[in-house]
Image (tube, coloured by chain):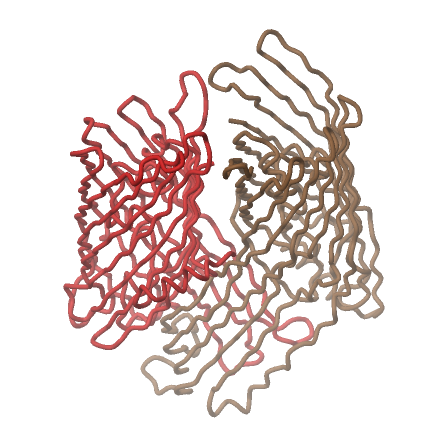
Chain colours: A red, B brown
Amino acid sequence: MTRITALAVLVATLVAAPARASLPDLIGIGTRSPALAGLGAADSDDWEATWLNPAGLAHAPRRRLTIGYVAVRQRLRLDGAPRPIEPTDGLFIGATLPLPFGGALRDRLAIGLGFYYPFGVINRARDAFPDRPRLALLDDRTQVVSILVSLGVRVHRRVSLGIGVLALAALTGEIRIAQDATGATTTISEQQLVTSFAPVAGLRIEAARWLTVGVALRGESRSSYDIKIKADLADLLPFTLPVLRIAGVAQYDPLQMAFEGSFRPTPWLRALVGLTWKHWSAYPNPIENATDGAAPLPSPEFHDTVVPRAGLEARLPLDGRHRGRLLALTLRGGYAFEWTPAPTGPTRTLLDASRHVVAGGLGLSWSTRRGGFSGSLDLFGQAHFLDGDARATGRMNAFGATLGLDL
Amino acid sequence: MTARVLLFLALLSSVARANPLDAFGFGARAPALANAASALADDASANYYNPAGLVRGSDLRIDVAYRAAVPHLRLNGRDLGVDDSRGFAVGLAAPGRLGPVRFAFGASLWLPDQRLTRVRSISFDQPRFVYYDNRTQRLVLSANLALQIVRGLYVGVGLTFMSRTTGTVYLKGNIAVGNPDESALVTSIDVDLIAIRYPQAGLLWEIRRGLAVSVVYRHSFLLRSDQAFRIDGNVGSEGAPPIVENGYFAAKTSTNDLFQPWQLTAGVAAQLLRPLLVTFDLTFARWSEFPVPASSLELTLDVKQFNDRVKLPPPRQYPPSRFHDIVTPRLGVEVRAYEGGRGHRRLAVDVRGGYAYEPTPVPEQIGPASLADNDKHTFSLGLGLDLLGLGPVLPKPLSLDAFVATTWLPDRAHRKLDPLDRVGDFVSGGVIVNAGLGLRTRF
């Protein structure tokens, strides 16, 4: 994998500390949406729409390939002590492919592909013993590959629909330790990676020339694991080992529904507002007991949340027609309040805190009149300030850059 | 008796887990040509056969195919009940321009319809079809970039993604004596599914209209699974003083899941006559680097006063595999059997056929290992329909492809040096039938 070394060094100097989590839900996907604090369900029309609202793909103006880098760093404290978390560095690859059908289907269909790949890791399952306090959403949500495939359809001049899937992997299997025919101990194992699909669907309506609204439904996504370990070593050990079941949920994003509006008071300015409902009350215990004899684990007792977001985007034409090129600078900013779903209390072990998310970014886009080299370079930065639970404090920072090229 | 038991175990559990693209190809056109397509592919299948081919066309291409391979592999005349290999092949080729430079982005996905990945390790002594058993059934995701260097000369590079598991599971609590199911153990986990990437690169030169040559390199990889677990705690009955207090038991296992040799393919595609296309590929595969397909296991424990009573056997030493390198020729022929139509509607029918010979890299199994493999003769047949003028909705050609291929593994005898070998002499052989349907679209 090509590591954008220079960019990584730049990022390392700009951001503060470590992170790993379900990236699309935690900071967004791409660079425009994270710069708007996660907004984009109402007006995104590039590969970010695969997650935000696939209906937006139907408005994709041209075939585009996007590649990017993202880094997340956390500096968190748990019960007053530093909580070191490995940094996340990942790669974005996205593509929007309007399907050039003719006739009745002309300019109506587009496919979007999204791929987020945390460097080196497809899926990471990490969880402490159930009696130990940990950061349920920031610490234990895993680094995981996200693959998104979506289709957008313009059903009316002002109405488009979209549907897609987010694919995750679930691991099941069995490991058996036994003696072979020569008396040596050996391992016999069978493990399977099976697919877990989470649907993403959306509706986008051009309500007026100055207003677009979007509704997106993102299904619950979970990456689980369930491995049995059997040790047939009765001839070697003075006791019999039980069958161990290693099971849990490595990554979990709740069912959520986003409602957003994008207002254009002037041709160069957009104001975006949105609310996202998240069904966190279905959050499962991240890890199960290995044997039935252990004491039952307490329920996480998470509650549903609503996340308000607001953002501004200003598109400023630069020197107009420099050598036949059209240049534009876009400035973005946003704020979101991520209300924590976790209950508080001195005996709780699954801890979390509400987060104030402050985001910003900029983009430089260029195009040529005669089909030459056109594309855009976008950057974003996000800062999450934890607030609301004295046991979980600190800050999380994210930074990313994407380069989009029109094909 | 033991040999029968081991053979019975093999019959129970042998599962076909070939690296699906190497074994059965991608799409539905190239497999009809016995996968001799490195100088031919200009559609989404170029993501596998030769990434340089992605930039040959100017249309956006999206291909989808479904294929199923049904093996009937025998050991001593008994069918091993090897699993089918079925799934979808989906790919795209998206060409574009960066100023004067033509380039293309491509991606392909092989998606098994049963599971994404199956990783399995079995006892070293257990007989197996190593080509299909060790090379596991798994999802294959590939992304490629290609560009035109000068007119007619293309280069492409890409990455294919695989995965492996590594990590440790920690447990603590009490192991019950008498009834282990009453043990009270809780878990902490630190396991990663790590991405393994291997590169591929291709060069394609269109010498003149109807004649192209190619060179493709596909790098090797070894997927090694490292897993461990450790139990800390007591051994004893609930409510009674522990028999062992604060002891531990740990197991660490490493398994070679999947090996792919590096491969170098040289190919040619020639339009000898107007209706006749001939393709030929020659592939060198570096199988001599094949590692021992065995698991290593390391056990450690501290059971206090019982330590003296535990005698853990030393790790077993395995003999090297001694595979050898192979060269595989593949030949494909495509004949335009019909071309006609009325008005804007055009129909073309292609008939395809092919043959490939893949010698086995596996030496005769004279030692304790019983890795069955055979020479493979593949005969393929296929049909392609090109439809043009389907109306304003689909102004560009639509291609439908179908193929069926049979791989014949002639019987091969393995004679053991040790007359007391637990498996004994065995004969391997069989047939694999592979068939598929595909749709290729251009936009």
In the image, what residue occupies the spot 61% across and 45% down?
B156
Asked if residue B108 shows in the view, the reply is yes
Q: Quadrant of residue A156?
A: top left
Q: From the viewer's perspective, tell me whether residue A240 is left or right of residue B335.
A: left
Give residue A347's position: percent from left, percent from top. Answer: 19, 72
Q: From the viewer's perspective, tell me whether residue B64 is left or right of residue B358.
A: left
Q: From the viewer's perspective, tell me whether residue A336 is left or right of residue B341.
A: left
Give residue B440's position: percent from left, percent from top. Answer: 57, 29
Q: Nearer the viewer, residue A374 or B50?
A: A374
Give residue A256's position: percent from left, percent from top. Answer: 26, 45
Q: Quadrant of the N terminus of chain B?
A: bottom right
Hey, which residue is sitting farthest front in the picture?
Answer: A323
Q: Quadrant of residue B192?
A: bottom left
Q: Nearer the viewer, residue B394 or B5?
A: B394
Q: Quadrant of residue A77?
A: bottom left
Hey, which residue is sitting farthest top in the picture?
Answer: B343
Q: From the viewer's perspective, tell me whether residue A170 is left or right of residue B336.
A: left
Q: Is residue A214 above or below residue A238?
A: above
Q: Is residue A315 above or below residue B414?
A: above
In the image, what residue occupies the spot 37% across and 56% down?
A70
Q: Nearer the viewer, residue B375 or A338?
A: A338
Give residue B293's position: percent from left, percent from top. Answer: 67, 64
Asked if residue B12 shows in the view, the reply is no
